[in-house]
Amino acid sequence: MTTAEPKTLLGAARAGQTAAPARFNFARDVVDAQDPDRVALTWVSADTTRVRDVTYGTLADASSRLAGALAGLGLAPGARVLVVMGRVPDWHVVLLACMKAGLVALPGTPLLTAGDIAYRLAASAAQAVVTGPDQLAKVPAGPIRIVAGTAPPGWHALDDLIATGPATGAVDTAATDPMLIYFTSGTTSAPKMVPRDHAYGLAHAVTGVHWMDLRPDGLHWTLTDTGWAKAAWGMMFPQLLLGTRIFLYEGGGAFDADLHLRLIGRHGVTSFCAPPTLYRLFAQMDLGTYDLSSLRRCLGAGEPLNPEAMRVWTAATGLDIADGYGQTESIAVVGNMPGMAIRPGSMGRPLPGIEVAVVDEAGAELAPEQIGHIAVRPGAPGLFDGYLTADGIDRRAFRHGWYYTGDTARRDADGYLWFIGRADDLILSAAYRISPFEVESALLEHPAVAESAVVGAPDPIRGQIVKAFIVLAAGVEGTPALAEDIQAFCKRQTAPYKYPREIAFVRALPKTISGKIRRVELRGG
């Protein structure tokens, strides 16, 4: 190793420090530096009948061999590789191998369609694809094709490459060299490419120490799929940095809330992160029938968490849910930190070393309780430099000395941030600025409402009115009388001017493949 002593680097990360040496390769300088006999992750098969512990030594050896094999296939440093795999240990091996070979991995969810894959290949000019057997038919001819399983003609078998590849040393990358490219989830437009360098992996020490509160003796489970940056947060960088064992449940098919809750107790999960959608689903279960006693730290991310779901979870477990905020473009930048008083509905305060403010269009910081843009000061650890396009780097989100996240919030007098919504989603009605999230949270407390999405609908007098699209609980029929009851209920739960003046009962809400609501479709965009 030519950059920094492993123990020094890992020790600094475990103290929440994020400064990377000039020459830095995450796979070499972090994963290979760990105790090879230490268990890095525990994998459970989809049917839960198979459990496998994978050590750091296994990850290090397999990724080194695969790195050599990828180079042997003609992939030179800087080449891009689309990785479409499920929650299996091979996903870690492939990403680490790409790092060692100096390649740039583009993670993608197995839910991608053939059209999605074609779009990503064209946009990124990827030269190779690594995928699972279920995605074979979706991948076009042209790039180098590698499959985790039996390889048909024109494909390479991943296991064969790992078994026969030479265990070469890692490419000596700079900390600023590209390591990953993530595609955004595309809630308002076509997915954009977000490049991440090797230093990004080390920056996640902030995520792991100051928000997740990871411990070396812990077992961490984040419910996400491998195609999103949340996987980098929850099953890769913070955990590998801090030596926290990763729980990797293969899953698949329809989400089984009962099984997921049982797995927590069966395997002794200590820290757990889930999106609010799933906490709301768990809140409908009889949580008292599950063994959740191993849990020490519970986290929420992906969208704001409704206070009612938090109350149910806390009553059952004795643990608050520590909400946090960040993006594909960043690490965790705001969060409810260990020991901090949690205010239900707030995503917390800016994390150490990261300057976050609520600003106006000119970049001026707003007074408490004023709604404005969530902005991050450039230079923050783990913050990207701009979107990758065919013409270079698009930095239009950087202006007035800030990175504008595209999200809005308000800050209270104590510095807690309260999410309002995407800037495009904010509703302006008769001079009132209304957060869709606040209305949705109120609606979800009505017993007849299973899901809701709120948008602004055009109105000749008010400019916009609040319109709610509601998925009803099982067995409930949507009637005009029920709509009036929900409206009256909402007026009692929040400021009366926020209630939905129009309600549409729908069977399902339009969502991205990452599960986020596409309000742009509901607005008719």
Image: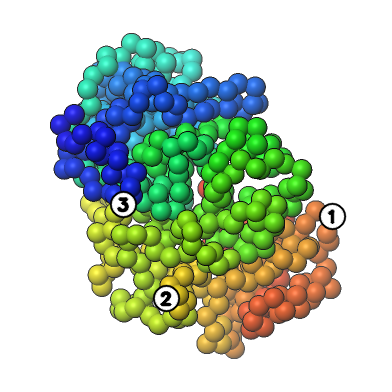
Label annotation for residue 475: 1
* Residue 227 place in picture, x, y as percent: 46, 40
Question: Which residue appears at 58% of the width and 60% of the height?
Answer: 305
- Residue 126, by quadrant, is top left
Could you tell me the amino acid type at mark 1? Answer: Gly
Q: Residue at x 49, y 59 (%)?
A: 339
The one of 435 and 198 positioned closer to us in this rendering: 198
Residue at far top of view: 164
Q: CA distance from mark 2 to mark 1?
A: 40 Å
Residue to which mark 2 is pinned? 372
Judging depth in this view, the residue of 452 and 351 nearest the camera is 351
For residue 405, side relative to residue 223 (left or right) = left
Please report the residue visible at 64 percent of the width from the left and 26 percent of the height from the top: 48
Q: CA distance from mark 2 to mark 3?
A: 23 Å
Identified by mark 3, the residue type is Gly
- 2 vs 1, front mark: 2
Residue 314, how many percent across, how many down?
Answer: 65, 56
Mark 3 nearby-residue class (10 Å; few <14, some 14–19, many ≥20)? many
Nearer to us in this view, 291 or 25: 291
Residue occupied by mark 3: 382
Name the quadrant of the N terminus: top left
Q: At 31% across and 44% down in the image, what residue appears?
A: 13
* 89 on left or right of 71: right
| Looking at the image, residue 505 lies above or below residue 160 | below
Determine which of the numbered discs, if any, sits on residue 61 in the image.
none
Question: Of the residues shown, which amino acid type is indicated by label 2?
Answer: Gly
Q: Position of residue 490 (x, y in %)?
A: 71, 75
